Image: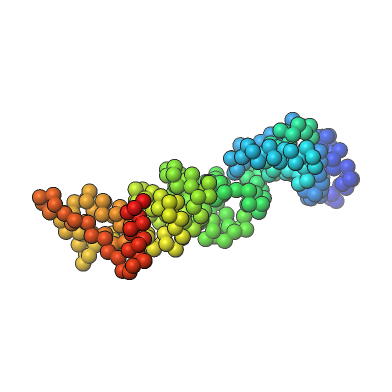
Amino acid sequence: MAKAKFDTGGIKALLGNPKQLEKAVQENPQEVVRELATTVAMVPISQVKTNSGQPRKAFDKEALEELAASIRAHGIIQPITVRRIQDKEYQIISGERRYRAAQIAGLKEIPAYVRLANDQELLEMALIENIQREDLNAWEIAVSYGRLAEEFKLTHEELSARVGKQRSTITNYLRLLKFEGDPDIKKGIIENRISMGHARALAGVDDYAIRNSIYKQIVESDLSVRAVEALIASYQESRKPKDGKKDAGLSPQLREIQDRLNAFFGAKVQLKRENTGKGQIVIKFSNDAELNRLLDSIER
């Protein structure tokens, strides 16, 4: 049976006639979806709702006010994208920032691309479109990947295929979720105080205290990713037992202190303590530049 034809020029009218729209979708879904994806409709802003699953959560108030001023002067240049839930109800897929600014500007209608999508497609499209526009920070991307993986049982390979990113990229972002319980590092990622490379290196450190000590050094000293990797390597090397034995004469508490000193200085540190309580801390360095770096750390 041949598919029924419909007038694509009347797609905007179909949006206002739910029965006709449903009939058109039943008869020729591919044509309807294709036309909706390229046709800009003026949707009453009161009928548009935000998406609770939208990856982006933080919106700068001052930036929104500036965008609202631009919208008042020039209108919305780039339409938002929404999903039609039912008659007179739409949910944002992408463009929430423009939608919020349009509300501030007092607009009654907003230009929009209307799509038909299930919940999984909604989240995928929101994520993909926002990533392409660089609207998300690394933490928001990681959370979005995590939600896709958890809610829709997708493997890293399947996520890679969905969003068009390499599997290694997906894996690196998902590793950031390790910092959910690290408020300082999580905030640093959100505020771009550390790069993706810094975060990836930190994710390889299991000890919470050491990880946060290194993070503070990154922020305070503006350490490069390579310097952080070297610092972590030094810490991990200090953790290796010599000749298969742990540091002689050090209790677990003192070994932890020694580990923290290794991480803090990014150099080999030996903590020695006698039974009487006397002892010494030995910090090794290999050249004048390293000595100066150690002195800077001490002065801070």
Q: Quadrant of residue 15?
A: top right
Q: Nearer the viewer, residue 231 or 114?
A: 231
Residue under the point 79% across and 40% down: 73
Residue at screen point 44% across, 44% down: 184
Looking at the image, residue 191 sits to the left or right of residue 88; the answer is left
One can see residue 160 in this view: yes
Q: Position of residue 32 (x, y in %)?
A: 80, 46
From what the image shows, is residue 292 above or below residue 63?
below
The residue shown at (88%, 42%) is 10
Q: 1 left or right of 143?
A: right
**Is any atom of residue 236 visible in this view?**
no
In this view of the protein, which residue sits in the foreground, 146 or 182?
Answer: 182
Residue at the (26%, 51%) spot, across then down: 256
List the single residue furthest toward the bottom.
287
- Residue 248 image point, x, y percent: 16, 59
**Please, which residue is most extreme toward the left here?**
276
